[in-house]
Image: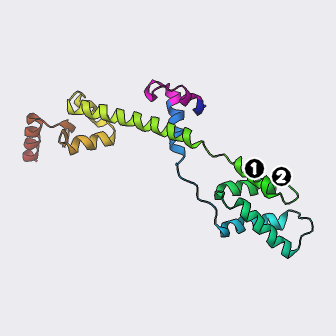
Amino acid sequence: MVTDIIAKGTDFSSLSDQDQHLLRDFANRYVIAEPKTITKDQFRTLMRPMASTLKMPNSTPERGRWKLSTYWMVLSGLPYNALAYAVSSALSEMEWMPAPAILLQQAKEFAQPDIRLLSKAKAMVREHDQRVFSDQCHKLFMKQIPMNQLTELPRNVIRYGKDQGIIFELPRYGLVYRTRETVNAALLIENSD
């Protein structure tokens, strides 16, 4: 579904509310990071239950060490989560110890979102959010937002308005634009208390 939304190539704001929600949810669910390859200790921890549970033909301690080093040689470049998925699959589906190639194939099936797709979704959401923020800040600067709607603005826009001296908090009235009249009213309120 997300693939179809991105394939439309439309701007985020022109998408339906449902499509915007799906895309934002997808973009926020995952973090783009290079998966770290598994360490030898993690590898041993994952392989131990499989080696002790699944049958191995003609197994001796010496052959077991050789096999483990072969598995390490083939599988050591995998991320931890992918190998954990492959081992879990093998434990639940197989009686015999699978060959490294089978574990490698299962690890490739590990559900990881397409990085390009995720990057595009994140970029679309980020560009939309930045455009909305910029538009709201511009309207705030131009005093085009009614004063009774200032408190409904997102916190980052309110913070921008306060930092820029465009708006301030007037006791008993809430957020107001900084004008000569509102500053005088604030002084009167302060002096009356």
Instruction: Please tell me whether mark 1 sits on a helix, a strand or a loop.
Output: helix
| N-term mark: 2 or 1 | 2
- Is residue 6 rendered to the left or right of residue 140? right
Instruction: Please tell me whether mark 2 sits on a helix, a strand or a loop.
Output: helix
From the image, tell me which residue sits under label 1. Answer: 105
From the image, tell me which residue sits under label 2. Answer: 93
Is 12 in front, or is 163?
Answer: 12
- Amino acid under label 1? Gln
Q: Can residue 130 be found in the magenta stretch?
A: no
Density class for disc 2 (Cα within 10 Å; few <14, some 14-19, many ≥20) is: few
Q: Tell me which corner region of the image, top left, top right, bottom left or bottom right, holds residue 152.
A: top left
What residue is shown at x 11% (from left), y 41% (from top)?
186
Q: Can residue 11 be found in the magenta stretch?
A: yes
The label on residue 76 is: none
What residue is shown at x 34% (from left), y 38% (from top)?
154
- Residue furthest bottom as drawn: 62
Density class for disc 1 (Cα within 10 Å; few <14, some 14-19, many ≥20) is: few
- Is residue 193 rendered to the left or right of residue 56? left
Q: Position of residue 142 (x, y in %)?
A: 20, 29
Instruction: Decide: is 138 above or below 84.
Output: above
Q: Which residues are magenta?
A: 4-19
Q: Can residue 48 be spotted in the picture?
A: no
Q: Position of residue 13 (x, y in %)?
A: 43, 27
- Label 2, label 1: how far apart the Cα atoms are: 14 Å
- Is residue 3 rendered to the left or right of residue 155? right
